[in-house]
Structure formats: C-alpha cells, structure tokens
C-alpha cells in the first residue's frame, strides 16, 4: 500500500509522464532501457509500484555493502558479482524453477556507458526459464517512461533483437550520449 502511494505521489509531482501497456500477467524479465542515469532506478520503481508488479532487480554487489544492504534488498535488489556473471544467471534460473514468482528488472546496457553492446543475461534467463521479456523504457525526448510490449523469446537471437531494436529505436535515455544500441555480443559472433 505504501509503495503504491509513493508511486502515485511521484507521478503526481514528476515532470515525467507514465505511459504503459497493461502489466504482464505472468513472471517476466523486464528490461529497463536505455539505462543512462541513476534516475532510471527511481523511474523503474515508480513504474513497478504503480502497476503493482513485484520486482527484483540486479545490481552490482557494491550497492549492497554496509547499511545499504537491507535497503537495497528491501527494494527488491539481488547483488551481482561481476567477476562471475554466469553465476547470477544460474541463480535466477534456479529461483524461477523453484517456483518463485517475480518480475526481474534487468538493465542489459549495463553500467551506463563504456561498452558497445548489451549484456546477454536477460536473454539467457528468458530463454532458459520460458519467461517473456517486457520492454520497459525511458524517453527523454517525450519525457515519457513506462512499459512497452511483452514478447516471447524465440531463440533466433538476431530476429528477437531486431524486434527489441525496433522498439527502442526512437527512445532516448536521460543522458543520450551514454546510450548503447540494443545489440548482443552473440550477434557479432555469427
């Protein structure tokens, strides 16, 4: 109840406009992109709380140190050890197979700059669990944010990413100079 009230207050006073399709009706991997600012986190929580989506999100393990640990975990955070990214994918898959139901927010463009492709963990998690992918977005040009379509991953990486690229083609992050095109390294390897 408090989360929904906080989200309602945020959208009332924010200069951002929430534009969303109906919330996913089953567990989903929720992409948050383009991820170019720490403000994206506030927008993501406000979207999830207003749509009553129980979310978990992946964050670098340094965010969970000391006094921040209970706060970050209370907000749905799951710490990620970047030295072994395959381990977090396996842990999430195990949680889904154990029957945990949640929306998993992933920012596949990672750390807000400094690289040329998206991280593929969201794709592997969706493929191995059968969870669909919901396209969450931020668009600075229109000052809108929200949820786009929910799509099923087919296993054809290029075709799936073409659909994702088409959705994000006209979206600009809060700091557009840090934006990364939605492209997985696996697409370059083909």
Image (tube, rainbow, N blue to C red):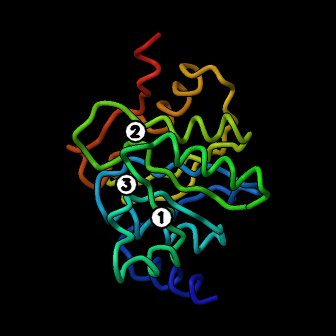
- Point out the tag, 2 or 1, that comes first from the N-terminus: 1
State if disc 3 and disc 2 touch (CB < 8 Å): no
51 to the left or right of 66: right
Residue drawn at (45%, 43%) of the image: 85
**For mark 2, does the 10 Å Cα neighbourhood hold few (<14), some (14 to 19), or many (20 or more) residues?**
few
Considering only order in the chain, which callout, 3 or 1, is on the residue closer to the N terminus? 1
> Residues under labels 1 and 3: Cα distance?
17 Å
Q: Nearer the viewer, residue 48 or 121?
A: 121
How far from the left and from the top, in percent, is residue 57? Answer: 51, 60
In the visual, does 70 lie left or right of 53? left
Q: Nearer the viewer, mark 1 or mark 3?
A: 1
**Which type of secondary structure does the marked residue at label 1 adopt?**
helix
- Cα–Cα span, label 2 and label 1: 19 Å
Nearer-the-camera pick, 84 or 70: 84
Task: Identify the image quadrant of residue 20.
Answer: bottom right
Q: Is residue 139 above or below residue 132?
A: below
Q: Is residue 44 above or below residue 49?
A: above
- Residue 11, given in percent of the width and then of the height, sits at 47, 77
> Which residue lies under the disc numbered 3?
142
Number of marks drawn: 3
Q: Which residue is mark 2?
A: 170
């Amino acid at each position: 109840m408090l989360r929904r009230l906080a989200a309602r207050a945020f959208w009332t006073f924010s200069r951002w406009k929430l534009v969303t399709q109906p919330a996913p009706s089953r567990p989903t991997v929720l992409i948050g992109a383009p991820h170019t600012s720490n403000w994206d986190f506030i927008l993501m929580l406000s979207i999830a709380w207003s749509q009553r989506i129980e979310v978990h999100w992946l964050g670098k393990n340094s965010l969970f140190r000391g006094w921040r640990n209970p706060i970050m975990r209370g907000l749905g955070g799951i710490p990620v050890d970047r030295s072994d990214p395959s381990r977090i994918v396996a842990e999430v898959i195990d949680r889904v197979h154990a029957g945990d139901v949640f929306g998993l927010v992933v920012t596949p463009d990672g750390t807000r700059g400094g690289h040329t492709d998206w991280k593929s963990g969201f794709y592997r998690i969706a493929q191995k669990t059968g969870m669909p992918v919901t396209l969450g977005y931020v668009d600075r040009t229109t000052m809108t944010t929200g949820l786009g379509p929910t799509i099923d991953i087919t296993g054809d990486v290029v075709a799936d990413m073409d659909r994702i690229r088409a959705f994000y083609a006209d979206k600009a992050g809060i700091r557009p100079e840090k934006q990364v095109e939605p492209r997985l390294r696996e697409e370059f390897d083909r």
